[in-house]
Image: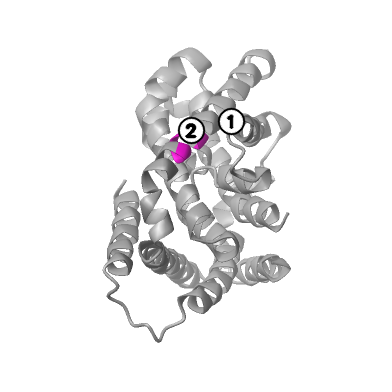
Amino acid sequence: MIYLFVLLIIGFLVGWLLRNKNNWIKTSEKILLYTIYLLLFTIGMSVGKNPKIIKNIFILGIDALVISFFCVLGSISIAFIVFKYILKK
Amino acid sequence: MKGTIVVISLFLVGLIIGLVDFYPHNINFEQLTDYLLMALMFIVGVTTGANKKTIALLKNANIKILTIPLSAIFGTWIGIIIVSLIYSKYHFFDLMAIGSGFGYYSLSSVLIQGVKGDDLATLALISNIFRELLTLIFTPIIAKYFGKIAPIASGGATSMDVTLPIITKYVGTEYAIISVFSGTVLTFLVPIFVTLFIKI
């Protein structure tokens, strides 16, 4: 997976060099959006042909709700403490 | 919101096509996903590096403003620790990767799928969409009881775009820049943290 990091950093440097070319940036943002859309579509397909996941989709939904609930609860609790004891002073 | 609907629809259309077995069997989708993933990481890098606003925001960062994305990061991870105590069926670092999507469901689920497969990717997709939805729905309550920066922390990476209007409505427009800053920092960190945790 290290090559993903390397690609990220090379991309960052390329983007930084091209930062003054506005149409390049717009294009790359569009490509990013469509790449993500395409990937989500192919993920949907491989999920669809996987009977194990389809059978468990309800349980996955419940688990997802539990995960997101605690991520939000943790975040707002720390934010509450930071706001009250660090930022307000 | 429009983006969310597009994403869910595309995922569902793909899911139905897979379900009814209506797709060309001679295409190797795993390999295709690998190549798309590599392209994706490169393009994420380009868009971040090319975004002058990101660089300017990061340059103006001071310790005080940094406490807000940091609250979101450590708060999320504390939440994940609690989740890992509830569920023994998921590996701790897989849950950390899912949590480190910070609401950026499209990118995080795609990154997780490349290494961890479809079930964890689906979990990452749904739970990060839920994070966005919970923030959209509960920001009025969160702002009232947890203070003005709590909705920004709750929104995670989405506080720079999707959840920004509702956040500024309930905590005031003077927090708009802070909200965008926090969302930008987290968006930047999502690919780094997610690939880090799926590697472990």
Chain letter behind tag 2: A
Looking at the image, residue B65 sits to the left or right of residue B156; the answer is: right
Identify the residue at horizontal 64%, vertical 31% (top origin). Answer: B85
Tag of residue B86: 1
**B165 on left or right of A81:** left
Residue at the image position 30 percent from the left and 58 percent from the top: B12
Q: Secondary structure at mark 1?
A: helix
> Residue B169 lies in what quarter of the image?
top left
Task: From this view, report whether residue B169 is shown above or below residue A16.
Answer: above
In the rendered image, is residue B144 in sight? yes
**For this rendering, which residue is in front, B61 or B134?**
B134
Q: Which one is closest to the eye, mark 2 or mark 1?
A: 1
Q: Are marks 2 and 1 on the same chain?
A: no
- Magenta residues, dominant SS class: helix
Amino acid at the residue labelled 2: Val
* Contact between labelled residues 1 and 2, with CB atoms less than 8 Å apart: yes
Callout 1 environment at 10 Å: few (<14), some (14 to 19), or many (20+)? few
Picture coordinates of residue B56, whole percent (x, y): 62, 49
Which residue is tagged 2? A66
Disc 2 from disc 1: Cα separation: 9 Å
Rendered position, B59 above or below B42: above
Alpha-carbon neighbours of circle 2 within 10 Å: few (<14), some, or many (≥20)?
some
Query: Total of numbered circles in the picture?
Result: 2
Which residue appears at 44% of the width and 69% of the height?
A35
Q: For this rendering, which residue is in front, A46 or B44?
A: A46
Q: Which residues are magenta?
A: A63-67
Rendering coords of residue A16 (x, y %): 64, 66
Q: Secondary structure at mark 2?
A: helix
Tell me the subunit letter for badge 1. Answer: B
